[in-house]
Amino acid sequence: MSEQSPAAALDAATLDAADPLRHFRSRFFDPGAQVVAYLDGNSLGRPLRDTAAYLSEFVAGAWGERLIRAWDEQWMEVPFVVGDRLGQVCLGAAPGQTVIADSTSVLIYKLLRAAVAERPDRVEILMARSDFPTDRYLAEGVAAETGRTIRWLEPPLDSGVSVDLVQEALSDRTAVVLLSHIAYRSGYLADAAAITRAAHEAGAVVIWDLCHSAGALPIELDAWGVDYAVGCTYKYLNGGPGSPAFAYVAAAHQATLRNPLTGWMGAADPFDMIAPFAPATGMRRLLTGTPPVLAMQPLIAMLDLVAEAGMPAIRAKSIALTEFAIELTDGLLARLGVTLSSPRDAAVRGSHITIDHPDFREITLALWDHGIIPDFRPPTGIRLGLSPLSTSFAEVEVGITAIHDELSRRA
Ligand SMILES: *Cc1c(COP(=O)(O)O)cnc(C)c1O
């Protein structure tokens, strides 16, 4: 334990006792004493306690007994049934616009190609330098393939893409705006509704990457008028390592949607096998190959848990967790040279914060050895991902106290 007096107005035990979502923590798998504080639920969400039983039931039932018949009986529809459920519980999306498929990276490629094709006379893709690497790399690839250029926004490291920053860069050259709803490093929460409106006024098409917001705060894709969106299911949606991603295509874009990866599962009749390729109607045309049905199973159970808790309560706890983490950072770490690289205003902050110090690369390794698990983000950041349904205030306190103790030992 640290010798410091309590740094925050309220202590972790009081906050945990008053947390209306506290009982959800017992629904997650208990890793025992070797995990002391898990602060990386935004990179890989924890499994549910019932996930093993649920998977085992799937193996014995649908897969083991129904075998190939299960494709006709239910599996062909699973990407759309689970997509609609995700759309309803987390995305503010009416049915028929969300599908579970591929990885986020592959879906970014598909949607970006489709969106660029909608604006053949426009040359720019608008993105941010602060975006996650795969988004940038894919956009560079698509730009090279399609003869477009990327116009890079340069937001400050500790914040993100404001409406003004986007507004200044938009023009009649802008084909597509591809941005992250929550910045993977700073946690900055972009005003998706206002940016979408501004992009549409400039005649551009919008794609939102929801990897760090899906399951962490309410999203209203239909109400915001978003064209396309994509995101992970293994972060705040606890789908498991490499669980498939989701894509949203607003109904208005579906009839003309051009999937650049035309495979049999996106064809009008996959089992015709003789006719030349013709795209399926609706979201099915975004598919390419056989849907990863096995890998979607843990997500199904997690969506029930999210629905039970409700997104407003999840957002409220998320804000309380990040506020607490910032209070502790100010009280314990600031005087040791640690800086906050995330917004102080909860209204523009997601469910993680990043703090910076030159020693954090080594300190992260030491923390992992002690079962305290945040993640490291270059060049000098520790990112604390606070997953509202599974993270306790005590974990936040233990984690930040351990960072304090490591830094003090080195000073
Ligand atoms: C996690 C993350 C990804 C991951 O993409 P994968 O294809 O699942 O590896 C992409 N974009 C953002 C913004 C992310 O945070």
Image: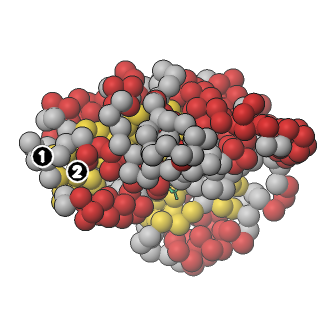
From the viewer's perspective, tell me whether residue 278 is left or right of residue 35: left
- Taking the spot 54% from the left edge, 46% from the top edge, the residue there is 274
- Taking the spot 36% from the left edge, 30% from the top edge, the residue there is 255
Does 298 appear above or below 132? above
Does 3 appear above or below 263? below
Q: Residues within 10 Å of mark 1 (few under 14, many from 20)?
A: few
| Outermost front residue | 274
From the viewer's perspective, tell me whether residue 282 is left or right of residue 270: left
- Taking the spot 45% from the left edge, 46% from the top edge, the residue there is 276
Question: Hey, what amino acid is under mark 1?
Answer: Asp
Residue 23 sits in which quadrant?
top right
- Taking the spot 13% from the left edge, 35% from the top edge, the residue there is 202
Q: Is residue 88 visible?
A: yes
Residue behind mark 1? 121
- Sequence-earlier tag: 2 or 1: 1
Pair 2/1: label in front: 1
Q: CA distance from mark 2 to mark 1?
A: 15 Å
Does 374 appear above or below 209? below
From the viewer's perspective, tell me whether residue 283 is left or right of residue 167: right
Kindly check if marks 2 and 1 are in contact, taking CB atoms under 8 A apart as contact: no
Q: Is mark 2 within 8 Å of ligand 1?
A: no
Q: Which mark is residue 225?
A: none
Quadrant for the N terminus in the image: bottom right
Does 137 appear above or below 394? below
Residue 379: x %, y % from top left: 42, 72
Residue 105: x %, y % from top left: 46, 56
| Nearest the eye: 306 or 105 | 105
Q: Which mark is residue 126?
A: 2
